[in-house]
Image: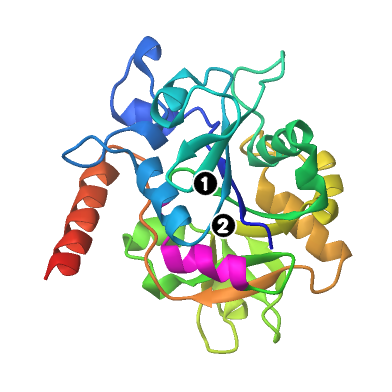
Amino acid sequence: MEANLIILAGGASTRMNASLNSSASNWKNKALIGIDSDGRPILDYLITNAEKAGYKNLIIVTGENAIEFKSFYGKQQNDNLFGTLKISYATQYVPKDRVKPLGTADALLQALQQYSYLKKTTFIVCNADNLYSVEAFEALIQTPFKNAFIAYDRKGLNFSTDRISKFALVQLDQDQFLSNIIEKPEPNEISKCRDTSGSLRVSMNIFKLDGSAIISYLENCPMNPERNEKELPSAILNMCHEIPKAMKGILFHEHVPDLTSKEDIAVLKHYLDTAQNKKNS
């Protein structure tokens, strides 16, 4: 496949900036907040992992003001160089009747509208605030399935019990294809979510998608009634309900560092320091 990667970074970073007590004029996209002693952001590490995995084309979906991103990754709208990667930007415009962006399904839809070649090929799409491994990126390049996602073993995620309990669980059929996503499973529903190995699986929002297959589901994605946004997992699940065995689950057991609040900055720094120490030993 062509190694295309779309990183969704157009969110308002509301929770992060609130935890940092930032004033509205000083709000910063959390993907660009420095997390190490050199001030490198999580997005830098994420892009580096994608480059190591063999990706060549990267589109960063930003809000309407992309100045911060362009100061890091190049001022051209298209084909800025980052090592062997070409970085371009797509803009997630906010509807006139809203203050915040319309959600991740809308972000991806706007990227496909601005780069129409994506409607005819496969690509990987992920969040900007999760640090996915080189191995996860490689697995999605190498899979023969046009639509796939990393199905993480919940036991491998090194988060607090309270935080993990809030993650949606995915249900896979006996062939490891996605059949359902349960947002807030009741205790009696949890056992139904175990896969054939007995593990509970979660999605950390890293997907391989076929543009021609997903486009109509992005266009017709329903609004989440609680968050008032159009969410990419909803569009994917609607596709899976209409097309049997549409989305293959790739089983992984590893941690995925996440940047949600200011407490996560120190956790991420420790994670990176530990990984560097292991590499040097």
| Whole-percent x, y for residue 47 in the image | 44, 47
Amino acid beneath label 1: Asn
Split into 4 quadrants, where in the image is the N terminus? bottom right
How far apart marks 1 and 2 lie (CA) works out to 7 Å
Q: Is residue 109 visible?
A: yes
Q: Which quadrant would residue 69 be assigned to in this image?
A: top left
Say which residue appears at 14% left-offset and 63% top-offset: 277
Say which residue appears at 21% left-offset and 48% top-offset: 269
Report the residue marked by disc 1: 127
Say which residue appears at 54% left-offset and 41% top-offset: 86
Residue 135 shown in magenta? yes
Magenta stretch in the rendered image: 130-142
Split into 4 quadrants, where in the image is the C terminus? bottom left
Kindly check if marks 1 and 2 are in contact, taking CB atoms under 8 A apart as contact: yes
Q: Is residue 264 left or right of residue 129?
A: left
Q: Which quadrant would residue 107 be assigned to in this image?
A: top right
